Amino acid sequence: MLQLAAFSQELDSQANFKTPLREDMQFAPTPVPLRTLRCGQRASVVSLNGSAHEVARLSEMGLRRGVEVTVLRNGITCILQLEGHRLCIRLPKELIILVIPV
Amino acid sequence: MSHANSDSKDILVAVLGNPNTGKSTLFNVLTGIRQQTGNYPGVTVENHTGRLQIGDAAFELVDLPGTYSLAPRSPDEVVTVNVLLGKPPADKAPDLILCVVDASNLQRNLFLVSQVLDLHRPTVIAVNMLDVARRNGIRIELDQLSKLLGVPVVGVQANKRIGLAELKSAMVGAVHHAPTVIHDPFTNELNERIKRLQAVCPDDCQLKRFAVTRMLFDTDGFMTTQLKTELGAELAASVRVEQAALESTGETVAESESHARYNWIKQHLNSFITQTRPPRLSTITDRLDHWLTHPVWGLLTAAVVLVALFQLVFWAAEPASLLIDNFNAAMSSVVDSVVPKGALNSLLTDGLINGVGSVLVFLPQILLLFFILAVLEDTGYLARAAFLLDKYLSRLGLSGITLFPLLSSFACAIPGIMATRVIKNQQERMITIMIAPLMSCSARLPIYVLLIAAFVPNQKFLGGIVGLRGLTMLAMYLIGIVVAIGMAWLLKKTLLKTGVSSFVMELPSYKVPSLRNIGQRMFDGGWAFVRDAGTLIVAMTILVWAAGYFPRVGKNLPAQLVAEQQSLEQKIENLDANTDDNQRASLNEQLASVAGKLDGYQLRQSYLGRAGRLIEPIVKPLGWDWRIGSAAIASFPAREVVVSTMGVIFGLGADTDEQSQTLREALQTTTWEGSERKLFTLPVALSLMVFFALCAQCVSTLAVIRRETNSWWWPTFTFVYMTVLAYVAALITFQVFSLFS
């Protein structure tokens, strides 16, 4: 019995530990790779992950953290509408742009 | 009244801006025709300059390549930065920087402006395309922007020549005045780092702040290598320390600069931009893109555009070419009437006029192709086609941007290869350079036209819409494209291994192209062709002429032919005024035929003829005899000489061209020497065309590859692989088609 009680207590503590995290997750939507967006979807850029060279070039051209983009054509080579201009971008596996759809 | 010292050097102005801002349009309207295009010594970056007189002041404007940033990531961009700093290849720093920005996309354009202001040099900002911004409901307070940046800001509409007077007076006023505000877009933390680096920077370093800022944000090592020798290893080490410290705060070096600058721009945006009404939901660009970038309709449109492009070039260029041919014939007859027959006459008519002519004949086609390409690019369409094809090109280690140089290569591989400079990825650029000469350039057209008209039956299908001749022509273009695809794939897998790289390209808004820009591009392209290729082709034509003309056989000509020639000449001389025209014509024809045979005999004994006979065993499996062989050899320096060489070789004199009925007939009737068997059959014609489609017969192209790759290995490789491929493909073509006929 004691064992069972201890086990149930452990379960509780785990649950207690997990619950706030799960709630947190509900409030902050999970970032998804830009490649998974559909045509016409809007999203906010969370991070650019890739070689310094490519990340620097993209952010200079306006595709940077915090910017909102609209996907005009999706696919490996996609067209994005940014504030005031549109870019044609090919995203290889090594370059991942995480976004939160809005 | 003029007290300005007109002896002093001109005021040097660097014109800078993002691509698609109308920078070139503004440059053109400011400088008019007083322009010059050249290369900076030692580098392949074009140096486009123009002059401008404002009152007493003489300005010299340098049009720098369009760029999004001053962080140099390619050799091209290093030159741009060096020109701004007044380092070699430039002679001195610009006295004034004219920065052109697009009003309808001010936020991104100000990023470059922000970098330029770090130089703290006299600067003027020209805000172009105010009309487009107004249509989008954007109002820009130029005075506020000027106050914020500390430099004059002038609104212009370059294509309508609006605001030029204000711009000019702002330029005159700004020359000796640095910005009134010290531009500081950085956070305190970044500023501390920059200050610490400035302290390490040697005292004699000009533009300290700019130099250390560029080094701090340098991700590619270009700038550090560039400045290391100049500024010392100590500074380079300090830069690395600061970069590491920056990364440890969670910020990346790659992003920190754009964060700082864009945040600064955003923070001040409301002070100079007002959105007077909500932006339109659907612009013309949106509507056009809906169709033109569509996976099905877009590709279909691209196919139609490409086919139409080639059709137009063939159709429209023909009358112009004919005109030049007639001009050449007229020139030749003038020479004939002035210079007596002999070596000099032959050099002038067969060598020089023909050599220059063989260059000029392609000029209309090249101009037209440059015109169409410039229209496609200026309207913004080419970027859409590049997007659609990127998916397919990426599998070959290429990207959508390679469409620009490859399309140009259909006019001429030389401008095509020079256009590869826009490709940022080095491997991709090399692959493009290697396959560009496989695109059927306009120099291959004459041999296709001649042989197809002579040997391909004029059959029509589908009610006359599709002809066998047209299809053969298309096949010649396709074979180049197919081989190029195979080669690109092979290079990607072997010598130039690449994974899938990233690719970014701006899709500019569609616009009506400026005729002035297009005219300029046509002129530049045409002139570069005449200058670069022209001089070399003329020299080569003269060499080929000499190889075919010497050594003179002289007295050893076959006696029977010489006697026949003399008797005919006698007969013609003795004709009186009332002789029948037909009889006269017939005699002249006979004389021409005998003269042709004599020329043929002479050619057989010439250096060229000897070389042809030497290689006969090699070319026999292709269905060729020594005469076709020597025509092919003669065409190695420049393939456009083949038609005139064949004219000489097949006993007609060199003033024939592909339109000439007689050369066509001569080819149809020529037999193997000492036999009744026809020399040219359909398989032979096809094998010759395939050979010309694939062979590297152009010294100018190889020279350009040498210059652009800065190595002998790549032009050698190109020459060897193309020649081997051409031989093998011609062999297969001949053997396969011989089976069927």
Image (cartoon, coloured by chain):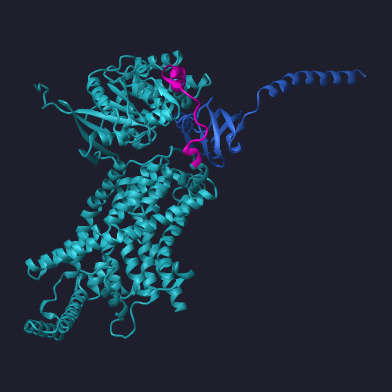
In the displayed structure, would residue A97 be above or below residue B317? above
- Residue B568 in view of the camera: yes
> Could you say where residue B650 lies in the image, as x and y percent from the top left?
25, 75
The span shown in magenta is B260-287
On whether residue B284 falls in the magenta region, the answer is yes
Nearer to us in this view, B384 or B630? B384
Colour of chain B, in one word, is: cyan
Give the quadrant of the N terminus of chain B.
Answer: top left
Q: Nearer the viewer, residue B531 or B227?
A: B531
Q: Position of residue B117 (x, y in %)?
A: 34, 21
Farthest-out residue, right: A1
Residue at image location 24% in from the left, 71% down from the top: B647
Q: Residue A99: where, in percent of width, then height?
A: 59, 30
Identify by letter the chain in blue: A
Observer-nearest of B555 and B21: B21
**What residue is shown at x 24% (from left), y 73% (from top)?**
B649
